[in-house]
Image (cartoon, helix red, strand yellow):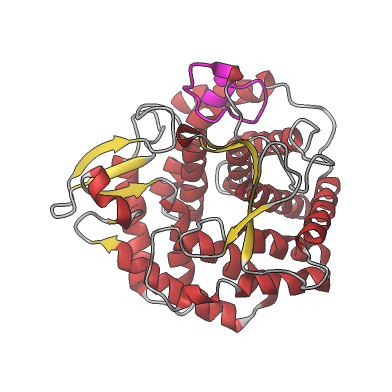
Amino acid sequence: MKKVVLGMMLCGLVACQAPKAESFDVNKALDYCTSQVSKALDALHDVEGGYDFTMEPRNILEGDTVWNCRKASAEEWCSGFWPGVLWMDYTYTKDDSIRKVAEGYTASLNFLAERPVYDHDLGFLVINSFLKGYEATGNEEYKRIALAAADTLATLYNNKVGTILSWPRHVKDYGGHNTIMDNMINLELLFWASENGGSQRLRDIAVSHADTTMRYHFREDGSCYHVAVYDTLTGNFIKGVTHQGYADSSMWARGQSWAIYGYTMVYRFTKEQRFLDHAQKVTDIYLKRLHETSDDWVPIWDMDDPRGQQAPKDASAACVVASALLELQQYVDAEKGKVYAQAAEDMLRDLSSDRYQSRDRNVAFLMHSTGHHPAGSEIDASIIYADYYYIEALLRYAQKNLKN
């Protein structure tokens, strides 16, 4: 009976969110991305010196038209997203000129294989650049660097706690071992490495992290804290708090999107039913709250912001969820799979509209993402990780249609 009610609720959600009747033209959206990549590369190219591959695009703020770049480094967690965008565009176009530029931006991160870990974002840095590059080319050097980075990331694991430490520099600030929801994404590097020449221990760490996070990082309804704090010595859970959300008790949209994407990915590697069940639970509360708080399929930055629909949007969260749902819909029963697939399509349709696509306004794919709202940083901006998950979702959608 519970299953039937949930199915009715989700089907009602899809109907009430006013899906459009026309089919979504994914090739048009991918061609648009290719056009924007070309514009961005033109802006990044110095006529005399070519590209400075060490400067990776990060954001385009209001009033700007080209990417603001930051030095590629372990401290700059977004350094891998632009290479990943280029690798995915190359996958779509097979344009060797894009491949060469992708190789250049990826090579600027080679140092990650040689230095001690800075924080958990090593996973983001390597998955988005070297793993995407390896998928596209089979370059064995990319595989070597990714395997080395996986071993380095594993040094942050605390056996007493059962999770990877996210921010070593903030242990004193939080009063213990801190693990953020974003860290779920980094587990992909460990799982991948364990299946591609790395040790079984890497997989064991990833499973432990996912289990411990599932146990302590979520409220009863499936919504998540941004940060879980544990006693470093005993491993006991201390508290759940926020860092980038509205409040400790609120649903920060991108944090929930990391949970959806993360547990879907964990199920891909483990095929353990508990992870699939949890992926659905965290997805269903997101869709329910999205319906309650947003005027379309793109969430406000935090679903408990008292300004409601007047609050800034976060297109990046919608991109992460759309990409995750296009994978998750393959694993669930047929009825629910249709609901998830339709929701992903509606998200991509809205994201591909004039309301969200940058088009002639700047060289990014999308506008209206929110980075760190409490710090007043990157609010209502174009942000590189939104573009990354947008093109990933488009490619997954295109692949899904080829299979049908």
**Residue 218 in the image: x percent, y percent?**
35, 36
In this rendering, the answer to whether 205 lies above or below 291 is: below
Rendering quarter of residue 118: bottom left
Answer whether residue 305 is magenta in the image: yes
**Residue 122 in the image: x percent, y percent?**
45, 63
Residue drawn at point x = 82 percent, y = 41 percent:
359
**Residue 76 in the image: x percent, y percent?**
50, 58
Task: Name the chief secondary structure element in magenta.
Answer: loop
Answer whether residue 127 is magenta in the image: no
Give the side of residue 301 with respect to residue 339, left or right: left
Q: Nearer the viewer, residue 155 or 246?
A: 246
Residue drawn at point x = 61 percent, y = 29 percent:
313
Q: Which residue extends farthest left?
A: 234
Q: What stretch of residues is rendered in magenta?
A: 289-308
Q: Which residue extends farthest front?
A: 48
- Can residue 147 be seen by looking at this rendering? no
Q: Nearer the viewer, residue 362 or 165?
A: 362
- Can residue 124 be seen by looking at this rendering? yes
Picture mark count: 0
Rendering quarter of residue 157: bottom left
Residue drawn at point x = 74 percent, y = 49 percent:
66
Give the side of residue 350 with respect to residue 179, left or right: right
Give the side of residue 170 with respect to residue 283, left or right: left
Q: Nearer the viewer, residue 47 or 176?
A: 47
